[in-house]
Image: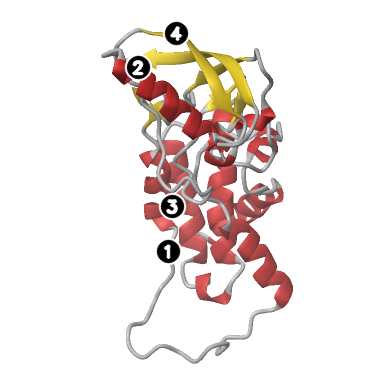
Amino acid sequence: MAGKLINITLRVWRQSGPNDPGKLETYKADGISTDMSFLEMLDVVNDGLEREDKEPIAFDHDCREGICGMCGSVINGVAHGPQSETTLCQLHMRKFKDGDTIIIEPFRANGFPLIKDLAVDRSALDRIIQAGGYITVKTGQAPDAHAIPIPKPAADIAMDAASCIGCGACVAACPNASASLFTAAKITQLCTLPQGNPERTTRVIKMVQQMDKEGFGSCSKYYECEAVCPKGIKVENITTMNREYMKAMVSGK
């Protein structure tokens, strides 16, 4: 790494399991290159812990390319850290200064049970998708491209909503621990397109009911979800979800 070297202090939440007591523990991270990503920095810290026969810090990660949503943690009180529209794995240490103290905590929400240290169980979001986040597909020969005309504005709305990676930062940032932005993005993605019309009414009812069943809070329009979303998902999607839900309930389907 050719970047500037900085020395930082980490205050990391350590907790052996969901039923064990947890606390912030302090670690020194010296000689960290500013060209490193945040997760690369944690890898270096873990290498040092393992050399000392200490338990490494458990944290979620997978693609490290900002597309899978696995890397969420709260950095100095902000989900995914200080850089807007950036996942934690794409956050680089150049955003921090020499001598900084960085507090790292897991996403905290009833819907996200803690597994260990910074790793939480976000399968509740998967169950919301399973409840209704799909479309009817007829098997057989693939249709010709552009067989179903879709207006450009509708396609843009659907594509913007589809950029949600399900990281759960919106839940972690919301004072109510609401999953409304996530659920709304998935509903908007499908209800905007003609392919999503067959399940349109049942979809929104099932997904909203599953969201409530998982123990997430309600939306009070704090806008904290939009502020921390690494993909810039807008709260207008929640308005779409509410409108779709009201229509579905009135229709009685």
Marks 1 and 2, the one that precedes in the sequence:
2
User: Dot 1: within a 10 Å radius of its alpha carbon, few (fewer than 14), some, or many (20 or more) residues?
Assistant: some
Residue type marked 4: Glu
For the residues bearing labels 1 and 3, Cβ distance under 8 angstroms:
no
Figure quadrant of the N terminus: top right
- Displayed quadrant of residue 150: bottom right
Q: CA distance from mark 1 to mark 2?
A: 44 Å
Which residue is under mark 4? 25
Marks 3 and 2, the one that precedes in the sequence:
2
Residue type marked 1: Tyr
Q: Secondary structure at mark 4?
A: strand
**Number of marks present in the image shown:** 4
- Between circles 3 and 2, the one closer to the viewer is 2
Which residue is under mark 3? 206
Instruction: From the top left corner, tell me how far across and down residue 48 is, in percent.
Output: 37, 19
- Displayed quadrant of residue 170: top right
Instruction: Identify which residue, 103 or 198, lies in the foreground.
Output: 103
Marks 2 and 4, the one that precedes in the sequence:
4
